[in-house]
Image (cartoon, grey):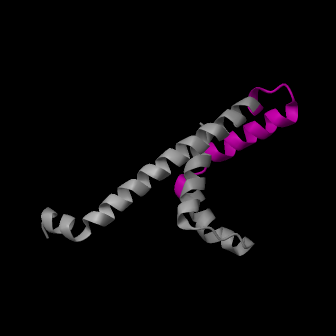
Amino acid sequence: MSISKLLTQFGDQYVQALLTTWKLTALAFTLAFAIGIVITVMRICPIKPLRMAGDFYVQIFRNIPGAALLILLVYAMPYLNLVWSYYTCVLIATSLIPASF
């Protein structure tokens, strides 16, 4: 199948997928930035429990693979009666992990 046939048949879906990707990127960046600022403030805070909580967050989310977190959100959370859409799960995973860096 040629590219021109693919674009005429599925062109609108490609555009929709591109716009969804851009939307997810912008939202994930904004959330990761906000969470990262909070975690950074916690890590430099003179209050020891806050410093420890910030360090714990960073150690956990820097060392967990993104795919593993996504699988956990999609397949394990329903056992805890927390069912989210795939969009929400991807947004959570792509926000929590970059925030730790």
Residue 31 sits above or below residue 9 on the image: above
Residue at 71%, 43% in the rendered image: 57
Residue 90 on image: x %, y %: 54, 58
Q: Is residue 3 left or right of residue 77?
A: left
Residue 18 on image: x %, y %: 36, 55
Residue at 75%, 37% in the rendered image: 54
In the rendered image, the quadrant that contains the C terminus is top right
Residue 41 on image: x %, y %: 74, 30
In the rendered image, the quadrant that contains the N terminus is bottom left
Q: To which quarter of the image does residue 31 belong?
A: top right
Q: Bounds of the magenta span?
A: 42-67
Residue at 13%, 63% in the rendered image: 4
Q: To which quarter of the image does residue 84 belong?
A: bottom right
Q: Is the magenta stretch mostly helix, strand or loop?
A: helix
Residue 3 on image: x %, y %: 15, 62
Residue at 59%, 67% in the rendered image: 74
The residue lying toward the viewer, choosing from 27 and 78, is 27
Q: Is residue 36 left or right of residue 50?
A: left
> Looking at the image, can residue 61 be seen?
yes
Q: To which quarter of the image does residue 92 belong?
A: bottom right
> Looking at the image, can residue 63 be seen?
no
